[in-house]
């Protein structure tokens, strides 16, 4: 009985691993770019939107989203994530929590305020309408 139960459990674990592998392969087929922790809010937001879109296209289940997305963190961002996983492995379980933690770390409040002020005091000045509109969208 124990042998049969052990065999069933091993089989279920293999099925679970195959499911994760299937979603990883779907995501990897798109050759996602990574995020290295650069303190450029535009790069962070662009990466998060890009990865979220890919996860959606790959039909990734909610319980794997953070695990798969975090695979594409590089450099300082990857080191930060390794620390977070060790100190509080269950602390970040949803995509929203993951992105918010990334923002708090790599787009700190002081930089957010600076960008907010840039937005509030944006003037067209010598910029063309197209340049002004692009800057407006970037800051917004």
Image: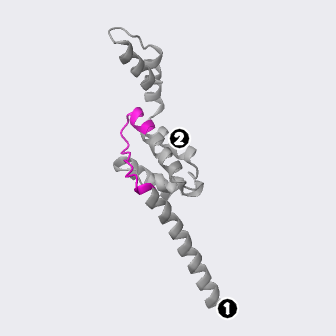
Is 29 on the left-hand or right-hand side of 99? left
Count of numbered tags: 2
Position above or below: 131 against 71:
above
Which residue occupies 38% across, 36% down?
39
Q: Which residue is mark 2?
A: 100
Residue 43: say if magenta.
yes
Which residue occupies 42% across, 26% down?
138
Disc 1 is placed on an element classified as loop
Q: Which residue is mark 1?
A: 1
Q: Nearer the viewer, residue 109 or 102?
A: 102
Which residue occupies 45% across, 19% down?
119
Category of crowding for the residue at label 2, using alpha-carbon neighbours closer than 10 angstroms: few (below 14), some (14–19), many (at least 20): few
Category of crowding for the residue at label 1, using alpha-carbon neighbours closer than 10 angstroms: few (below 14), some (14–19), many (at least 20): few
Is 5 on the left-hand or right-hand side of 76? right
Position above or below: 62 against 48:
below
Which residue occupies 45% across, 36% down?
45
| Picture quadrant where residue 130 is located | top left
């Amino acid at each position: 009985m124990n042998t049969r139960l052990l065999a069933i459990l091993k089989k279920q674990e293999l099925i679970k691993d195959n499911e994760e592998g299937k979603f990883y392969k779907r995501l990897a087929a798109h050759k996602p770019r990574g995020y290295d922790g650069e303190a450029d809010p535009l790069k962070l937001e662009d990466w998060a939107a890009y990865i979220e879109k890919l996860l959606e296209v790959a039909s990734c289940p909610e319980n794997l989203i953070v695990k798969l997305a975090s695979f594409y963190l590089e450099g300082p961002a990857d080191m930060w994530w390794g620390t977070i996983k060790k100190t509080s492995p269950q602390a970040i379980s949803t995509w929203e929590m993951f992105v918010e933690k990334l923002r708090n770390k790599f787009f700190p409040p002081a930089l957010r305020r600076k960008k907010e002020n840039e937005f509030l005091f944006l003037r067209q000045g010598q910029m063309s309408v197209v340049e002004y509109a692009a800057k407006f969208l970037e800051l917004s």
